[in-house]
Image (cartoon, rainbow, N blue to C red):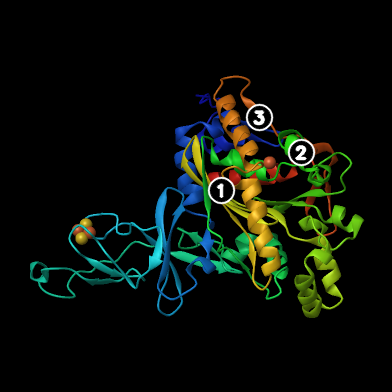
Amino acid sequence: MNTAVPAGSDAGTLYDRLIRPDRVHGSLYTDQQIFGEELRRIWYRTWVFVGHESEVANPNDYVRKRLGLQDVIMTRDAEGRIHLLLNRCAHRGNQICDDSRGNSSSFRCPYHGWTFRNTGELLGYPYNKGYGGKGKVDARLGAVPRVASYHGFVFGSFATDGPDLLEHLGAAAGEIDRLARLSPEGEAELTAGWLQHRTKANWKLLAENETDGYHPQFVHGSIFGVTGSPIGALYSDASTAVTRNLGNGHSENDLRPEFRKFNEPMRWFGTTESRVPDYVARMRELHGTDAAKILVEGAPHVMIFPNLFIAEIQVFNIQPVAVDECVQYSTAVQLKGAPELNKRMISQSIGSVGPAGMLLADDTEMYERNQRGVEALSPEWLDVRRGLSRERVDENGFTIGTATDETGMRGFWSHYKKLMEA
Ligand code: FES
Ligand code: FE
């Protein structure tokens, strides 16, 4: 394994040595100790995407989720509030919930029968005289202390203080707004079910690739060729699309300049207005003259640090398993009030990220090859300098590069470094 961390005088400057403006050290993807630090300083500290409120639509619905290495039960209580409970009995640590989803106001531990409400509160324990009677045990299920959502996207933070979710999202919140705005009812839902892709690669290789506009022409060249897809051209040297560092580790591949050039509503979705007439009519009714712009510009392509990737019509949730392994969960976006689009979003997602899909399989092959490559001892560094000398600042103060530049990766690494050194 590449654990040859470059020498330096003290631990405080470790990440300064590993993360340079134009390159990052291979040990960041292979070192066990660094992975342990990431769990403490990123996964169990910052805001991490967990799931969507629409997955627990009714009171007492629950669904099992992951947050870092934690097995989490996302519940909606009788009053409608969302909780992220840790799947561990407060008695002697047994796993309390087996089913991947369901509806129940309480969870009963199979070991000695302690029962907890879906808010985490202890309801009862058998043979209570052994504890001096009812209501004598002061215990509850563990929980992620801070839970917040934005347009239904649920995030959890194990830190009891620090930036709130809106501060963390910063400019990326506007990208979630853009997605929700495509629904005639102003709401995106994640109700199509999640596919799980277990990948033998460090989670950061996936996060970086989500913002990498350099690879599509090569990795996905064959599928673009076979299907006659216009996507490849969006990520070429001739593309007017830009890569934008949104701050806080978030970045977007802003394809709007390309779509504006063609000025064709629904082109972003690979279709025309005439094929989705009800949807277009509802959007025009709702947005009036603004509808044309919304329907031309389409959905965002944004990577929200550290693990939420919205790729127009799909949402990805990356969760680590080990230093060299992670799971990428993916689902099709469903727009409330847009049945014409929703059906197509599911079939397009099956075609691209499903078990026999042609897009994610290619990316996954790259992630795993990448992991095997970075375990070699030399050269020690990965290059992230593409476009560094031609970056500029846009009218809103964000650093941008061309469609194929590594501006987003550099934004990811600068925030990563800040968190790891905090
Ligand atoms: Fe859960 Fe004993 S471990 S009731
Ligand atoms: Fe790709």
The numbered disc on residue 101 is: none
Q: Pointer 3: residues within 10 angstroms few (<14), some, or many (20+)?
A: few
- Assign a secondary structure to mark 3: strand
What kind of residue is marked 2? Val
Name the residue at 61% across, 52% down: 305
Kind of residue indicated by mark 1: Leu
Q: Quadrant of residue 21?
A: top right
- Neighbour class for label 1 at 10 Å: few (<14), some, many (≥20)? some
Q: Answer yes or no: do the residues labelled 3 and 2 have beta carbons within 8 Å?
A: no
State which mark lies toward you, 3 or 1: 3
- Label 1 secondary element: helix
Can you identify the residue that label 2 sits on? 226
**N-term mark: 1 or 2:** 2
* Position of residue 213 measured from the top left corner of the image (x, y, whole percent): 75, 42
Q: Indicate the secondary structure of the residue bearing disc 2.
A: helix
- Labels 3, 2: front one: 2
Which amino acid type is marked by label 3? Leu
The residue beneath circle 1 is 419
The correct choice, above or below, for 53 with respect to 223 in the image is below
Percent coordinates x, y for residue 71 in the rendering: 39, 53
For ligand 1, which image quadrant applies?
bottom left
Q: CA distance from mark 3 to mark 2?
A: 32 Å
